[in-house]
Image (spheres, rainbow, N blue to C red):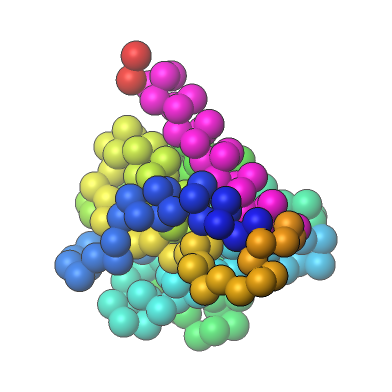
């Protein structure tokens, strides 16, 4: 139900606020997956739109990181095509189409940043995913400005908010997965 979903996702989403200082060398957008029809899933699309809005405002290169896809094309390749169709110059788009998780996103993005001499990045991902993403990107020596998007928390309750829904179950599951992933990487990297 909505109150339980909010209770789970709220601490994650409140970890970082949208920053005012956006002085960086590049925008990094983390993918979340795609479908067989060569389209991005909802979280990936929301993240991509957030990155595109920053691109239009700041005119910085975009790195889209995400290799996992159920289609024959990687999530990053699909995102690149969408960005080009939205008018982003292809020379401003860099992709990582090898990564399968957030740690690999950080590893492959760090390689791109070193090669391109990008010293500071704006990291765009879903608000519930930001805490773990920032931890991993910093672990791989990236100077990160967190820019959360795709907020899932909502406190506009009505009678239907107290009935179970698949959407609330999905978001609750994503939140639990984030907690487990955060704990896992804390144990692996910091013990």
Query: Does the magenta-highlighted stretch encompass residue 178?
Result: yes
Residue 157: x and y in percent read 56, 71
Find the residue positioned furthest to the bottom. 87
Residue 157 located left or right of residue 26: right
Prevailing secondary structure of the magenta residues: helix
Q: Is residue 122 visible?
A: no
- Which residue reaches farthest front? 159
Q: Residue furthest right?
A: 36
Residue at 26%, 56% in the rendered image: 145
Could you say which quadrant of the image residue 71 lies in? Answer: bottom right
**Residue 184 appears at what percent x and percent y?**
48, 25
Give coordinates of residue 105: x percent, y percent: 48, 44
Q: Residue at x 78, y 52 (%)?
A: 70
Note whether 68 is above or below 36 in the view shown. above
Give left or right: position of 41 versus 37. Answer: left
- In this view of the protein, which residue sits in the foreground, 134 or 169? 169
The one of 169 and 95 positioned closer to us in this rendering: 169
Location of residue 146 with respect to 45 vertically, above or below? above
Q: In the displayed structure, does residue 175 sit left or right of residue 165?
A: left
Quadrant, the N terminus: bottom right
Residue 79 quadrant: bottom right
Residue visible at 40% across and 48% down in the picture: 11
- Give the residues in magenta: 166-189
**In front of the other: 52 or 174:** 174
Does the magenta segment cover residue 131?
Answer: no
Quarter the C terminus occupies: top left
Residue shown at 41% from the left, 79% from the top:
53
The answer to which of 108 and 43 lies nearer the viewer is: 43
Residue 50 seen from this side: yes
């Amino acid at each position: 139900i909505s109150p339980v979903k909010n209770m789970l996702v709220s601490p994650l989403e409140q970890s970082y606020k949208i920053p005012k200082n956006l002085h960086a060398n590049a925008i990094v957008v983390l993918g979340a997956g795609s479908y067989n029809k060569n389209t991005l899933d909802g979280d990936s699309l929301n993240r991509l739109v957030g990155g595109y809005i920053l691109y239009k405002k700041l005119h910085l290169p975009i790195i889209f990181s995400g290799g996992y896809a159920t289609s024959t094309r990687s999530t990053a390749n699909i995102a690149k095509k969408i960005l080009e169709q939205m008018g982003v110059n292809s020379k401003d788009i860099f992709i990582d189409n090898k990564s399968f998780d957030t740690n690999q996103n950080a590893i492959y993005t760090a390689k791109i940043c070193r090669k391109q001499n990008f010293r500071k990045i704006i990291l765009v991902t879903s608000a519930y995913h930001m805490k773990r993403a920032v931890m991993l990107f910093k672990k791989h020596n990236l100077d990160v400005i967190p820019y959360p998007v795709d907020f899932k928390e909502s406190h506009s309750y009505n009678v239907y908010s107290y009935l179970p829904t698949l959407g609330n179950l999905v978001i609750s599951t994503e939140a639990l997965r984030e907690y487990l992933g955060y704990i896992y990487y804390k144990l692996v990297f910091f013990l």
